Image (cartoon, helix red, strand yellow):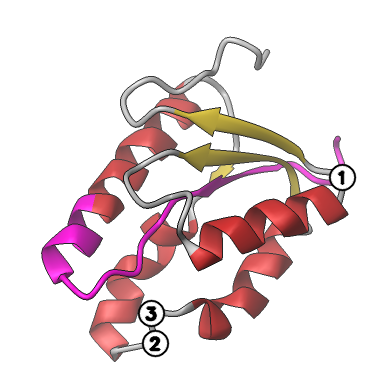
Amino acid sequence: MDDRPLTYLACPYSHPERNIRVSRYEAANKAAGELMQAGFIVFSPISHTHSISEACELPLGWDYWSTFDRAYLSMSCSLYVLCLDGWQESVGVNAEIEIAKQMDIEIQYLEQSNPRTDDHQT
């Protein structure tokens, strides 16, 4: 869809332990980079906002980030879900999946170290 050029990369982030949040951030960066190498135009909310969030001590929860994420999803033709531990329980990831369904956005699921990029043609 030319009018919705982005591929949105969802993954769990919020966790009480900072080291787990950082690990999730690093995994999101790797997956986003692999998708970009495959020709996707990627928006990764975790990659984009982790540093901003830490610098300004922004809230971690979906209540705060939902407005941002919904706006970026509206510009996306596909949603890739990075299936890190905790993704199925993640309030944010589950909400992003539901929003994608409502917006008729294609949904793909990625294993942490094996993005399925074979379907994409550049």
Q: CA distance from mark 2 to mark 3?
A: 4 Å
Residue name at image x 19 percent, y 52 percent: 23
Residue position for label 1: 104
The amino acid beneath tag 3 is: Leu
Residue 109 location, quadrant? top right
Q: Which residue range is magenta in the image?
A: 1-23
The amino acid beneath tag 2 is: Pro
Residue 122 in view in this figure: no
Mark 1–mark 3 CB contact (< 8 Å): no
Residue name at image x 48 percent, y 29 percent: 110
32 versus 51 height, above or below: above
Residue name at image x 34 percent, y 69 percent: 14
88 versus 30 height, above or below: below
Q: Residue 103, percent across and down?
A: 86, 53
How many labels sit on residues? 3
The amino acid beneath tag 1 is: Asp
Of label 1 and label 3, which has the lower sequence position? Answer: 3
Tag shown at residue 60: 3
- Nearest to the observer: residue 32 or residue 88: 88
Please state if 100 lies on the left or on the right of 46 as rendered. Answer: right
Residue 18 location, quadrant? bottom left
Q: Residue 55, percent across and down?
A: 25, 83
Q: CA distance from mark 1 to mark 3?
A: 27 Å
- Nearest to the observer: residue 75 or residue 65: 65
89 part of magenta stretch = no
Q: Secondary structure at mark 3?
A: loop
Q: Residue 11, percent across and down?
A: 44, 50
Pick the quarter of the image with the C terminus: top right
Residue position for label 2: 59
Please state if 91 lies on the left or on the right of 20 as rendered. Answer: right
